[in-house]
Image: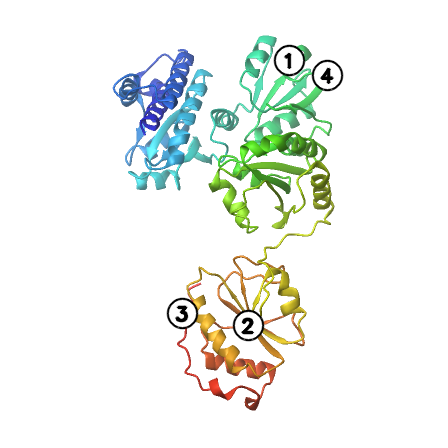
């Protein structure tokens, strides 16, 4: 708790420095690099628990209280109107993600200030001042908004200093960084970030303009330019052209990607989107949205503990290299249950402990499971099938039941044979264990099954949709009742779950043309169940 308090204090300290020119009339030419170093030192010390609340951390808080621009109901709208460029953090004190973002936001503020940016920085407690938050566009926590001459731009990128800095620079008129010396290139490389390097002899011409357009449109990756091949070679090894070159640099073993397409904005953006991720992306809460929105729609996920992944990593990288830009490879640490469990639940594998490989086609929602042993040969075949469309989609299923009762239990693997291909008329109840109405409806279905138990051409069945799937059973409301007529199973008849047992019996008789003398009279006059409220 103390460490989090100190991190927040350190974050506010740098935010205060970035705002101090407006509040304390500091010299605009001052160097804030020392303050950034101080922030990072406090940040690291706080994470180690080495600062006491009555020591350096308390002093940081006191400095923050005297300098930081804090918005409220009266000042929020006015700040947006008065500052030509304002970067605003909307937060809530109880929000864990706000606490994690605040130090990074502060580092970005100090870095931009050190670069000479004219952007002002502010924070707003959206829980304390909900009217002010609503007025400026804060709709959740945390929210980062950039206002340029009153126009709002919502930040949706990674919660890192470099990502925020890049985005703000692009939105405030500096989409490309120009590097003119070897020293500046070497200094830039120390930032260890993903960037696009463009070599243009005279910084002019149609192709250069397309490069600048792409840099302006892209919100995440920093673009840099130079007209000196010796400078470009420091950033991207192996450049041979003196005239024109474009490449992508990443901070991973597969570091360099050369652009070979036409110098057009769309082509450049496509190149960056397809290549900006590493060979294997480690899935996190921060990058999850970027993974989902990737233009690479075929995605292979490996789920395992970290120590198991170490044994698989080199093999996975080899396969990922083969399918680069065609299939995205992602690793999810199963120790991070909040990340892994939602995925594994889709396969009914939430309790699985051994390494698992799955795949998704985000263009249509299809999912796949690699059931063979995880090795290079099997994984390559799995990926080839995924790529050429021959890999069969995976659908959850319980084990095939051995016994059949009055109401037959259907599972994913038996839905085809028990329902669609069965020569009988089939009354099917689709339910889930958590459904509020399902238990009462199940009792009514059992009454119906007893009433019609003397008929050979009608059977009753039920399927638990939480653990069983079939492509021809698409249900979102539970319970759902279907009647599949024997002569045509392609368009089942949907019955209202509000109907009484008596009303459902009448409907079955009518649709299947069953006379009263063929039903079991013993239960034909059973009291009708009360209509059930359709809550789902």
Q: Quadrant of the N terminus?
A: top left
Residue found at the very far left of the displayed protein: 54
Horizontal and vertical percent position of residue 321: 69, 31
Q: Is residue 381 visible?
A: yes
Q: Which residue is mark 3?
A: 533
Horizontal and vertical percent position of residue 438: 45, 66
Q: Which residue is mark 2?
A: 405
For the residues marked 2 and 3, what is the alpha-carbon distance in whole angstroms?
A: 28 Å
Q: Which residue is mark 1?
A: 234
For the residue carrying disc 1, how many other residues have a C-alpha within 10 Å: few (<14), some (14-19), or many (20+)? Answer: some
- Determine which of the numbered discs, if any, sits on residue 243 in the image: 4
Sequence-wise, which precedes: disc 2 or disc 4?
4
Foreground: 482 or 349?
349
For the residue carrying disc 2, how many other residues have a C-alpha within 10 Å: few (<14), some (14-19), or many (20+)? Answer: few
Foreground: 269 or 317?
317
Marks 2 and 1 close (CB-CB < 8 Å)? no
- Determine which of the numbered discs, if any, sits on residue 54 in the image: none
For the residues marked 1 and 4, what is the alpha-carbon distance in whole angstroms?
A: 16 Å
Marks 2 and 4 close (CB-CB < 8 Å)? no
Is the residue 43 above or below the residue 123 in the image? above
Sequence-wise, which precedes: disc 2 or disc 3?
2
Q: In percent of the image, x 63 and y 52: which residue is there?
A: 394
Tell me: 129 left or right of 403.
left
Tell me: 301 left or right of 98.
right
Q: In percent of the image, x 59 and y 55: which residue is there?
A: 396
Sequence-wise, which precedes: disc 2 or disc 1?
1
Mark 3: secondary structure:
loop
Mark 2: secondary structure:
loop
For the residues marked 2 and 4, what is the alpha-carbon distance in whole angstroms?
A: 78 Å
For the residues marked 2 and 1, what is the alpha-carbon distance in whole angstroms?
A: 74 Å
């Amino acid at each position: 708790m103390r460490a989090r308090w100190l991190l927040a204090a350190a974050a506010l300290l740098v935010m205060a420095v970035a705002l101090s020119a407006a509040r304390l009339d500091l010299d605009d030419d001052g160097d804030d690099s020392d303050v950034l170093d101080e922030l990072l030192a406090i940040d690291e010390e706080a994470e180690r628990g080495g600062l006491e609340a009555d020591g350096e951390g308390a002093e940081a808080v006191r400095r923050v209280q005297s300098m930081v621009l804090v918005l409220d109901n009266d000042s929020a709208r006015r700040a947006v109107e008065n500052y030509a460029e304002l970067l605003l953090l909307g937060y809530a004190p109880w929000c864990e993600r706000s606490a994690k973002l605040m130090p990074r936001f502060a580092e970005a503020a100090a870095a931009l200030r050190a670069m000479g940016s004219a952007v002002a920085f502010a924070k707003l407690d959206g829980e304390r001042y909900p009217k002010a938050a609503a007025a400026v566009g804060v709709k959740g926590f945390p929210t980062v908004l950039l206002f340029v001459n009153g126009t709002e731009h919502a930040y949706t990128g990674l919660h890192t200093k470099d990502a925020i800095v890049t985005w703000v620079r692009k939105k405030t008129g500096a989409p490309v960084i120009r590097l003119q010396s070897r020293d500046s290139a070497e200094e830039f490389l120390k930032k260890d970030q993903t960037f696009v390097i463009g070599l243009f002899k005279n910084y002019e011409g149609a192709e250069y303009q397309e490069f600048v357009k792409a840099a302006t449109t892209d919100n995440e990756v920093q673009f840099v330019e130079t007209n000196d091949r010796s400078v470009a070679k420091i950033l991207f090894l192996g450049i041979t052209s003196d005239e024109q070159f474009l490449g992508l640099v990443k901070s991973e073993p597969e570091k360099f990607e050369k652009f070979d397409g036409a110098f057009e904005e769309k082509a450049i953006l496509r190149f960056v989107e397809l290549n900006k991720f590493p060979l294997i992306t480690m899935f996190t809460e921060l990058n999850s949205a970027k993974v989902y929105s990737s233009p690479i729609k075929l995605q292979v996920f490996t789920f395992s503990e970290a120590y198991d992944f170490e044994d698989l990593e080199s093999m996975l990288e080899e396969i990922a290299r083969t399918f680069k830009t065609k299939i995205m490879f992602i690793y999810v640490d199963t120790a991070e249950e909040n990340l892994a469990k939602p995925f594994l639940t889709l396969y009914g594998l939430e309790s699985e402990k051994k390494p698992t490989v799955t795949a998704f086609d985000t263009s249509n929602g299809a999912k796949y499971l690699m059931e063979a042993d995880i090795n290079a040969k099997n994984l390559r075949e799995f990926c080839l099938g995924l790529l050429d469309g021959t890999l069969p989609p995976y659908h959850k299923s319980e084990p095939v039941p051995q016994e059949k009762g009055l109401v037959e239990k259907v599972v994913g693997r038996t839905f085809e044979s028990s329902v669609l291909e069965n020569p009988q008329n089939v009354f099917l109840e689709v339910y889930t264990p958590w459904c509020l109405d399902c238990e009462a409806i199940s009792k009514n279905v059992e009454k119906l099954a007893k009433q019609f138990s003397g008929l050979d051409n009608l059977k009753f069945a039920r399927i638990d949709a939480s653990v069983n799937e079939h492509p021809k059973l698409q249900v979102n409301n539970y319970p759902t009742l279907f009647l599949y007529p024997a002569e045509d199973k392609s368009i089942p008849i949907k019955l209202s779950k509000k109907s009484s047992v008596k009303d459902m019996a009448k409907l079955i008789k009518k649709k299947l043309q069953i006379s009263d003398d063929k039903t079991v009279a013993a239960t034909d006059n059973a009291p009708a169940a009360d209509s059930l409220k359709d809550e789902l």
